[in-house]
Amino acid sequence: MNHPHHTHNSHTLSKRQASIALKKARTHISKVLTMIEDDQYCVDVLQQIRAVEGLLKSASEKVLKNHMQTCFAEGMSTHDKKRKEILIQEVLDVVKIS
């Protein structure tokens, strides 16, 4: 989603790390699919799925860190109260504890 308050294309270390984690997850998912197709032991498949979940969690954390250091920090430095409320709500919405 492209938001009007996103004013730059910062490619920070956090975003590069997220990209690496997502690429690893993509590769790993292909391997897990092969394991399932080859009817490998379910517990082994589940362990590999958990590994993918870990990579996705890591990528999510990196993207959130980047957002907090860039877009969020920039938005919070303004005097626009409505913008600040929107930024806070966006973060709360994506980090909801389920």
Image (cartoon, grey):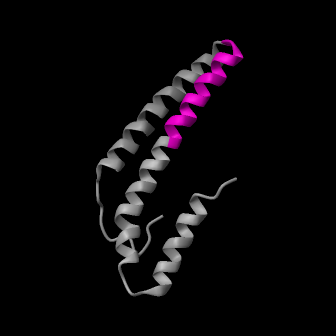
Query: Where is residue 93 shown, x and y percent of the image?
Result: 60, 64
Q: In the rendered structure, does residue 54 fall within the stretch colored magenta?
A: yes
> In the picture, residue 69 is in which quadrant?
bottom left
In the displayed structure image, the side of residue 33 where residue 17 appears, left or right: left
The residue lying toward the viewer, choosing from 69 and 48, is: 69
In the displayed structure image, the side of residue 57 where residue 38 appears, left or right: right
Query: Where is residue 25 shown, x and y percent of the image?
Result: 48, 33
Q: Which residues are magenta?
A: 39-57
Query: Where is residue 47 shown, x and y percent of the image?
Result: 62, 23
Query: How many numbered discs, if any?
Result: 0
User: Looking at the image, which residue is at 56% across and 71% down?
Assistant: 89
In the displayed structure image, the side of residue 34 where residue 39 appears, left or right: right
User: Looking at the image, which residue is at 50% across and 27% down?
Assistant: 28
From what the image shows, is residue 19 above or below residue 68? Answer: above
Magenta part mainly helix, strand or loop? helix
From what the image shows, is residue 48 above or below residue 85? Answer: above
The residue lying toward the viewer, choosing from 2 and 75, is: 75
User: Looking at the image, which residue is at 47% across and 86% down?
Assistant: 81
In the displayed structure image, the side of residue 75 where residue 93 appears, left or right: right
Q: In the rendered structure, does residue 55 fall within the stretch colored magenta?
A: yes
> In the picture, residue 74 is in which quadrant?
bottom left
> In the picture, residue 80 is in which quadrant?
bottom left
User: Looking at the image, which residue is at 52% across and 72% down?
Assistant: 88
